[in-house]
Image: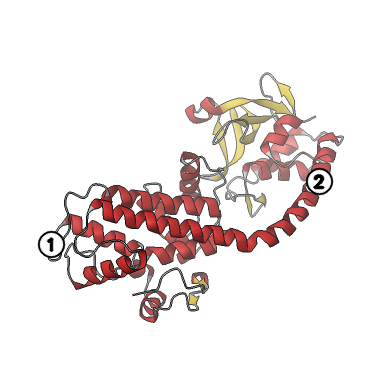
Amino acid sequence: MVTRRKWKGETNYMNGTAEQVMKHSLLYSFIASQPFAVYVDAYPALENKLLIEENAKLKYGEHGNIVRLLQHKLSKLSYYDDPVDGDFDIITEHALKKFQKDFDIDVTGHADPHTIRAIIKSEQKKLLSKVEELSESIYPGMHGEDVKIVQESLQYFGYYEGEIDGIYGPLTEKGLETAENEHDIELTNKITSDSLIELHESEAQLEDDDEDDEKVESSTEDDKEEKDVETNQNETENENEEAKTVEVKTANNSNIIETAQSLIGTPYVWGGDSPGGFDCSGFINYIYSTHDVTIPRTVNEVWNFGQHVDSPSIGDLVFFETYKPGPSHMGIYIGNGRFIHAGESRGVETSELNNPYWEDKYIGAKRIN
C-alpha cells in the first residue's frame, strides 16, 4: 500500500506522460497505462492531487484527461450531465459556473484553486454523508452495502485497491490496517460510523495541513508578485480613466449593425475579443473598434460609460443582469425587439427582447455618442 502524502512528483496527463508521483510503483504503472474509464475513481486522492496541480490550465478550450477528471467529479455532484469527453466546452463551463454560484465562489467559469478544492470537499462531504448512515458495526466476513461504504472511504483516501464488492475480505482488512496504523484509529477489530467519521476527519486535517504548507512555500513569491500587481493595478486604473474620459468618435449605426451581423455564428470564447471567438463584451468592443470607436472593456464599465435612454433605438446597447447582481451581459439593439450578442450557448446570434429569459433579466439601454 502507498505511503501517502509523502510523494512530491509531478504528472503531465495532458501529454500522456508522468514522472514518479507515488512510491507505490504498481499503482503508478496502473494509472499511467490504463485508459480513463479504467482508472477513474481507482485512486481519487491521486486524482485530487492532479486536479490541484493542473488547475491553472483548466478553462474553456482546454482538453485532455485532467478535464475528464473535472467533468467526472462535477457529474458525481449532479452539475454535469453530458458525456465525459475531456473537452472543456460551453457545457462544462456552464456546469462549473453553476457550482461556483451555489457555493458562493466568484463565477468565472475557470477551475481556479479555490473552486477545485471546493469540488473536492463537496465530493468528500457526499461520501461522509453515507458513512454517517452506517447501520451497524462492520466485522470481517460481512457482506452488504455497509461494507461497500467502508471500501469506498478506504479507496477514496488510497487505502483500498480492490473492487467495491461489499465483501469484507483480505483486501478490505489490509486497507483498514494501513489506515489504522497511519492515523492511530481503532478500525480492524470492528468498524462503526464513529470510527470511520474519525478517519475522514483525520484525512481532512492532513489536507488542511498540506494546503497550509503550500501557502508557506509560496509566500515569498507572493510578496514579490503583490508588489508587481500593485504597480500594474495603478497603471490599469490610469488606463481605465483615460478610456472613460476619451472623446468618442460617433460611428454610423447601420455600419455597426452590418459588422455585427457579419459575425453571426462566431463561437463563444471566455475572454475572447476576435473573430476566432468572443465573449459578450469582447464582441461589442471588437465591433466598435473596427469603426474607430473606443469604449471600456467590461460590461459594467460600458454600462457606466454610456448615456441612459428610456427605450433602445437601433444601434443602442441593451444590458442584462444574468449570473451576478448588476449588468453582466450586453448586446446591440437592431430593431423590431431584437438584439445581437455573443451568447454562451450558440455564440454570436440574434435574440428577442421579449423572450421570457431575456425579458426577465433586462435592466436597461445605453447609447454611445
Instruction: Spot the residue most to the right.
Output: 247
Residue plotted at (26% across, 61% down):
186
Q: Residues within 10 Å of mark 2 (few under 14, many from 20)?
A: few
- In the foreground, 39 or 15: 39
- Judge from the rendering whether residue 271 lies leftward or rightward of residue 307; answer left or right: left
**Alpha-carbon distance for marks 2 and 1?**
66 Å
Q: Quadrant of residue 241?
A: top right
Compare marks 2 and 1 and give the one earlier in the sequence. Answer: 1
Q: Is residue 313 above or below residue 216?
A: above
Q: How many marks?
A: 2
Q: Give the residue type that dot 2 points to.
A: Asn
Q: In this rendering, would 131 be left or right of 274?
A: left
Near mark 1 (Cα within 10 A), the count class, few <14, some 14-19 or many ≥20, is some
Question: Do we see residue 40 in this rendering?
Answer: no
Task: From the viewer's side, name the closer residue of 98 and 104.
Answer: 104
- The circle on residue 133 is none
Q: Nearer the viewer, residue 141 or 89?
A: 141
Residue name at image x 46 percent, y 39 percent: 102
Q: From what the image shows, is residue 51 above or below residue 336?
A: below
Residue 250 seen from this side: yes
Residue corresponding to mark 1: 142
- Amino acid type, residue under disc 1 in the picture: Met
Q: Which residue is mark 2?
A: 234
Q: In the rendered image, which quarter contains the C terminus?
A: top right
Q: Position of residue 44 (x, y in %)?
A: 38, 63
Q: What residue is drawn where x is 85% and y is 40%? A: 242
